[in-house]
Image: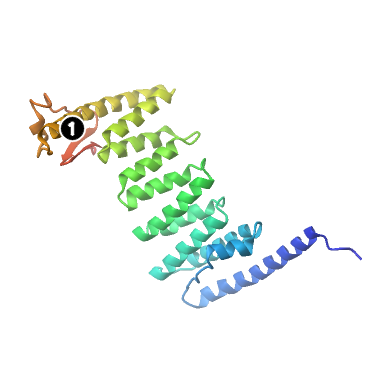
Amino acid sequence: MSTLTPSRIMITVLAGLLIAYSSLFSAYEKRIAISPPTISPTLPVVTLKVIGHIYLKQLIAESLFIKTAVFYGGLKKRMNEDNLHIMGQHFLAMGQLHPKLLDIYYRSESSLAHKGAVHTKTVNQILEHGRGVLPEQIELPFFEGFNYFHYLNEPVKAAKILRIASNITDSPQWIGHLASMLMASSGNIRTGLIWLKGMLSTTQNEDEKARFEKDIIAFEKALQVQMALDRYVARIGSYPDHLNDLLLADLQSIPTWEDGFVLEYQSPQLFLRRQAPQ
């Protein structure tokens, strides 16, 4: 009579779990087909980690992912707020249990990020954790930066996250360039200029060099106005109502741009922004 080795025991246990899960999956799919879909909350992550120990954590995470994907795919109407929160809870748990599963980030971004600020922040929390585990995965900071800019209207945070993305190996230069533009457009002209000069010093592409050099000229002209603004505040003790108030004492003339930029002043901040095409 053969003896059950630990490896055979583990295989038997896993096979049993897979059979049980397949039965539950089939029953859940049938229930969705005949009744209004709802999704049940997951157990606390700490509990799931204890249950899963080491190897089973991956299986639990993938099971939660399938459950969530089936639920979302079976919806025919708008999901209610309670279910959105529970879906976010599921994705947070998955990310803690098995953060190397890339599908977690793609699915949470596509299904939750656009559902309102609360859910966008949940997705960004998932992405931030993922960035710590997968620092070379460029999609994660790109999604997070996009969410900050497009859904949360926080361009500075977006720029900082995209800057992280731009430093990943083989990251396209346009991501770093976009980060610099966002910094300048949110009133951080100095930081945007520093980033642009950094990219100019590292690129070997002549077309990119020409573009960066052109943008650096525009940024430096804007920085002259920013420095004049700083001198005015140091001298007067308050911000001017208009940039023309800087003339003579702090600035000889207001620069003009013919390279796709426009300078905007909304006291107390100065913004350098891309000009919309005519």
Q: In which quarter of the image is residue 231?
A: top left
Count of numbered circles in the view: 1
Q: What element carries label 1?
A: helix
Q: Is residue 222 above or below residue 16?
A: above
Front residue of this view, candidates 33 and 107: 107
Q: In this view, does 217 lie above or below 145?
A: above
Front residue of this view, candidates 35 and 13: 13
> What amino acid does circle 1 point to?
Asp
Q: In this view, does 47 lie to the left or right of 161?
A: right
Query: Residue at the spot x=53%, y=45% of the render?
Result: 134
Q: In this view, does 44 lie to the left or right of 124?
A: right
Is residue 77 something one can see in this rendering?
no
Q: Quadrant of residue 20?
A: bottom right
Query: Residue at the spot x=51%, y=43% of the render?
Result: 137
Q: Quadrant of the N terminus?
A: bottom right
Query: Residue at the spot x=65%, y=57% of the render?
Result: 54
Front residue of this view, candidates 278 and 22: 22
User: Residue farthest to the bottom?
Assistant: 35
- Image position, residue 53 (x, y; %): 64, 60
Q: In this view, does 197 lie to the left or right of 89?
A: left
Is residue 273 something one can see in this rendering?
yes
- Image position, residue 249 (x, y; %): 8, 26
**What residue is shown with label 1?**
230
- Image position, residue 12 (x, y; %): 76, 64
User: Residue farthest to the right?
Assistant: 1
Query: Residue at the spot x=34%, y=58% of the render?
Result: 117
- Colour scheme: rainbow
Q: Quadrant of the C terminus?
A: top left
Neighbour tally class for label 1: few under 14, some 14-19, many 20 plus, Cα within 10 Å: some
